[in-house]
Structures are given as C-alpha cells and as structure tokens.
Image: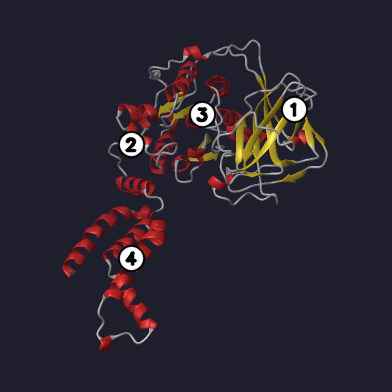
Amino acid sequence: MKNIVLLGGSNSVMVNGLQKGLKEYANVTNLALGGTTSLQNLYELKREKNQEAIQNADLIITESVINELDNHNIRENLSLDIIFKNLQFLYITLYKLKKPICILILPYRSKNYQIVINMHRFLANYYGLNIVDMQNYYQNNEIIQFGNKFGGHQLAVINRNVGKEIAKNIDIFKISKKSLDINMPEFKIVTPENMQRNGNFKIFNPNNSMYNEIVYRLEKGNSLSFNDCDGYEIIGMHSWNLENSGEITKLGFGIATAHCASIHLRNKNNDIVKPTSKLNIFCEIQAEPKVDSNLIVKFNDENLDNTEFYVNSHLEKPYKIILPYFDLIAFFLCKPNPKMKLFDLSVIPTDKDIEIDKDIDHSYLIPNIVFFKDSMEFIDEYIGHLYPNITKHIDNVLTPQIVNRVKEQLSQTKINPQKEPTSTIDLEKQITAKIKNHLSYKLGEALIRANKNWYKGGYIKFIFEVIKIKKEHKNRR
C-alpha cells in the first residue's frame, strides 16, 4: 500500500470521515489537529518526529480553509494578511519537498470565504500543486444550501468517500512541474526542554490513540527565556492545558473550551497575553514578537487582560473557569528572509472565483453527491445530523408525557368494582400495558431502534415501520 500524510483540522481527525476513506487504500499518518490553520500544518512538517513519515510519503494531503475562516471570523479575528502569509510559507515548503501534494478545499461559506478560498487556489496554481475543490463542486451543482446545513463539518460519509477516491487514485497526483527560484525563511521549533528554565517545572506526558506530547507547566514562580534565537519571531504556539493532576480532561468540548489559562510573553516593549483552553491547541501569536534576551515567557499570574484571543477559548461563558497554570508544548519561530518576495492581498480577487489550472485540478474525484451512490448510509447520517438528540428527547420528554397522559386517562376511567386492582402493583401493570399500547410509545420505541442501528439503514427501516405501526393502530381503534 502507498503512504499518505494527512494535514488538517477536525474534518481530518473525525474517525469515520476523511481519514477512514483514505485508510481503505493507503497507510495513513494523520498529523491533523482540530481548530488549527495552515500554520499547524507547516509546524507538523517541521517537527523532527514526523520526518520519516514525510520522507516516505507518496502523497501529502492538506486541508485548512475551514479553520482559517473560523479563526478569521470568530473571536480570534485572525487577519487576512497573516492567513495569506502563513499559507505562502506552507505551500512554499510543500513545493520544496518535491512530493505529490493534494490541497483539499472543503465546502464552507462564511464572511470572506471567497478571498480565503481564492488564496488556496492562487497558490495551488502558482506552485503547481494538485487540488480537489469541493467548494467549487457544491457551487457548480447548486447544492450550496445543502452544504450550509452542516457548518464546518460535512457529513462523515461524504468526506469518507472523497478520501477513498483520493487514495484509490493516488497515482494521478504528480509532483509539481514548476521550476521556481525561492528564497525560504528559516523555521525553528523551540520546546521548554531547550529553553532557559527559571524555577521548578512539572512535566507531563499526555497521550492517547492519536497524540503523544511532552508538556511543561508554567505557574506562579517559574518562567522561560530563549537561547540562540536572535532574529527569529514567534509566529505560533502549541499548548495542551491538562487537569490539575496532569491528566487529559474528560470534559465535553463545550465545557473544556471554557476552562482557560493565559500565557504572558513579556519584554521591555510588549506584553502579549493569550488564552488557550483544556484542548490540544496550536494557534498563531499574531503580534509575532521578535525574540531577544529580554523576552520572558510566564504564566499570566498578574491576571492581565488578554491582548489576543483563540477561537476555542470561550472566556465569555458564564461558567468559565480560569486555570492557575498554563501547559506549554512548544513555540514555532520564523526568521524572515529579506530576499524572499511574498505576494500581498492585492493579487487575490474578492468578487470572483479563481479558475484552477486543468492539469492540477482533480475535483472530478469527488463522488456524485447529488445522486449519492450509498444513499441509505447518506440518508441515515443526514437524519442523525438533523436529530442528534432524538433518543434523549424520547427518554426525557416524550415518555414522561405519555406516562402522565395514561395516568390521567386511568384516573378518569370508571373501574368495575369486581375488576378493581387489589394492589398498587396491579395498577402499575395496567398503566404499563396502557403505555406500551400507546401510539406515541410504539413510535418512540421504533425511533430508538432506528437510532441504535443507523449504520445498518435504521432510519430507512424506521420510515416503513412508522407506516406499519400507524396502520395497525388505526385498525385496533
């Protein structure tokens, strides 16, 4: 089997989505991380532990447009200039690898979607990198409104089949034919292990089926400073705030994003304060401070106001919790190259789509979503998306309503004295029998069965079962 390296956000992390389709035809090294932009993709390309997988890759896939739009539009206010600059750093690096590359544009519409997606298309054309453009496919097939129903995560079955087609046709992805003379900036990853550590540090090793990191805890009384990094700028940061014990949080996503801690980067000119939450996070440092001997890294123990934000740190929530520590993995540094010429935003149109060069456009691999061949699975997942809490609704709302209604009916019924229940148990049996014969109860049972067996066509069977139940109920009445 061929080898694929996958770079991206949560769409690439989803177990039953893109990566599952790729794994049907290839060995996959998944370096994706939810909530992260193209800068995290570049960071993973530069990490020492990933070099063997990258060198052995027959194809490198990158997707990041959805997170760039979210980080631009929601809370973090990541600027278009930073997004475009970092995209150029990523695509220059991918071009220089001389490997087959696939840029995957997932469908998403939010403010400034056209300019951000056009950045990817422009750079794909310029560097001659292969592209699969689902946004353009949805637009050409007039299913934009359908795609909008799912926000940042398309149905897993769609992404899975896209992944399957990419991996199955891996040999059509060619190395760029362009011959470009490029002056690269220098990048460096700095961890607390190779920084000057002041004070005592707790060190943790959070790991699960996908991630394995070394974390140093910043708290009141300790700090970090840089060694041998003059001329570099901090452009990104990797953190993973753990529980107080050092364990990975078991909180749900929504609660975990409201458990926040802030890091403080301080020198004589700047105070940069940025929060992250109880998630494995890579984010931009938008101020991009220059590293010098005066730059100190510490926990925000002075409770200073944040100067930057992160899309998945929800400090506005009433149930927020401010952590008394900050768990750091690494900083991502860049030393600019004065000979390197970067494009500015003026080259990117905002009122029309950039047309992709035909020799690199492999969007024909996208399966026919309009008449999806795996229709039962598709419809099941679609219904599951529309009604994700259907079982909870039945248990918490529908069943109590039925019970109360039946109790009312029984209390209003004149009972024959000779047949009057002799105990509470008899009454409960009557109520139970009445409930189980109630139309709503039977429909609820059928819906729960459908929900449990959605992957086997449960919702399709449910439609026919509803017809049968209603017919039987009508005949009994």
Eyeballing the image, is 56 above or below 231? below
Identified at 37% across, 85% down, the residue is 423
Q: What whole-number distance in Å separates the C-alpha atoms at marks 1 and 4?
A: 62 Å
Asked whether, in this view, residue 39 is left or right of residue 455, the answer is right
Locate the C terminus and report the quarter of the image it occupies: bottom left
Q: Are marks 3 and 1 in contact (CB under 8 Å)?
A: no
> For mark 3, does the 10 Å Cα neighbourhood hold few (<14), some (14 to 19), or many (20 or more) residues?
many
Which residue is denoted by mark 1 in the rendering? 266
Amino acid of disc 3: Glu
Asked whether, in this view, residue 36 is left or right of residue 164, the answer is right
User: What colour scheme does the image use?
Assistant: secondary structure
Eyeballing the image, is 184 above or below 192? above
Identified at 33% across, 33% down, the residue is 145
Identified at 51% across, 41% down, the residue is 13
Amino acid of disc 2: Phe
Which residue is denoted by mark 2 in the rendering? 146
